[in-house]
Amino acid sequence: MPSVATVVFWLIALLTVGSAVMVVTAKNILHAAFALCLSFLGVAGLYVFLHADFVAAVQLIVYVGGILVLIMFAVMFSSNVVEDTAEGGRSRIGMIVGGLVALAVFGIIVGIIQKLSVPPPSSSTAMPLVVANQHAAEPFAPTVSVKAGETGIGHLLMGQYLLPFEFASILLLAALIGAVVIVRKEIT
Amino acid sequence: MPPSILDGPDALVNYLLIAGVLFSCGLFAMISRRNAVGILMGVELILNAAGINFVAFARFGHAKLNGQHLDGQVFTLFIIVLAAAEAAVALALVLAVFQTHKTIALDEVDELKQ
């Protein structure tokens, strides 16, 4: 008898995978965008099952609230959805080649997964984790302990991963300015 | 003990399989779609698959250390940030291409200027 968590997990997995397939197969690009929304929601559910609550929240806010709205904007501004539906949107040769390549890659992935030797999941993930600090000499390393959950992520972002964090902010600024420069109208 | 379907959320293999399906779907979309926005959706699916893999390995890959390592979650956060930046720039490009070419079917946009 499967537990409730198992049933919910497989339902979310089915939602994620099924709507991902719909994203790929839908002829109307707007339907694909809505299916992508469902797929993002399913991935957020998977993050919750992986005890990554903060990542799940960020996934909801950034992907569903941000990127998906951007995609919807682009769909409605640019492509004429009806025309895309009428001509089928893509060529037969592209479908065949794409299907073959995707199936081959999926087969490779499954083959690698079968060879994986997996340790059992750790049981005490909810408790704060205190490990011996191996990076005590580094100036930005956390000094006392590594904590679980959002606190731990904050410590890592402000400590060990401070440089990538700052680079990410510079990248976001560059992307923002670049997007504005690309779409603005020339003032003559 | 081989993983069974009853393991559900407690087996790393399940997450890896889901991520594999997402990755293959994204690859298929990138190859077969002509619409630029459709290709961008494929890229987003692939990025999501990578994120699932990072978080899954962060949860299941450190059993010897008696706890959870958060590095994988931090990497997934960086992936999400990169995806946001990439989506913004890509959609700006799509709009710019549409203004000049009146289409975003990528095999019809084969010149750099009008």
Image: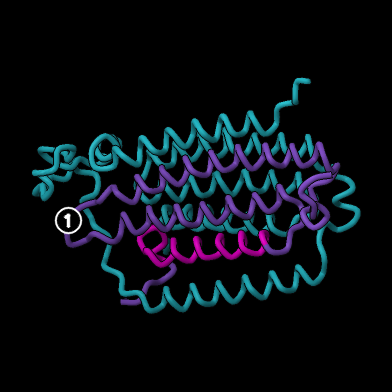
Image-quadrant location for residue A1:
bottom left
Image vertical order of residue B65 relative to residue A57, above or below: below
Q: Position of residue A160 (x, y in %)?
A: 24, 42
Q: Which residues are magenta?
A: B6-30
Image-quadrant location for residue A186:
top right
Q: Visible in this render: residue A153? A: no
Which amino acid type corresponds to the residue marked 1 in the rendered image?
A: Asn
* Chain ID, mark 1: B
SS at mark 1 in the image: loop
The residue lying at 69 percent from left, 71 percent from top is: A99
Q: Residues within 10 Å of mark 1 (few under 14, many from 20)?
A: some
Magenta-colored stretch includes residue B8: yes
The residue lying at 14 percent from left, 43 percent from top is: A138
The hue of chain B in the figure is purple
The residue lying at 88 percent from left, 45 percent from top is: A82
Q: Visible in this render: residue A26? A: yes
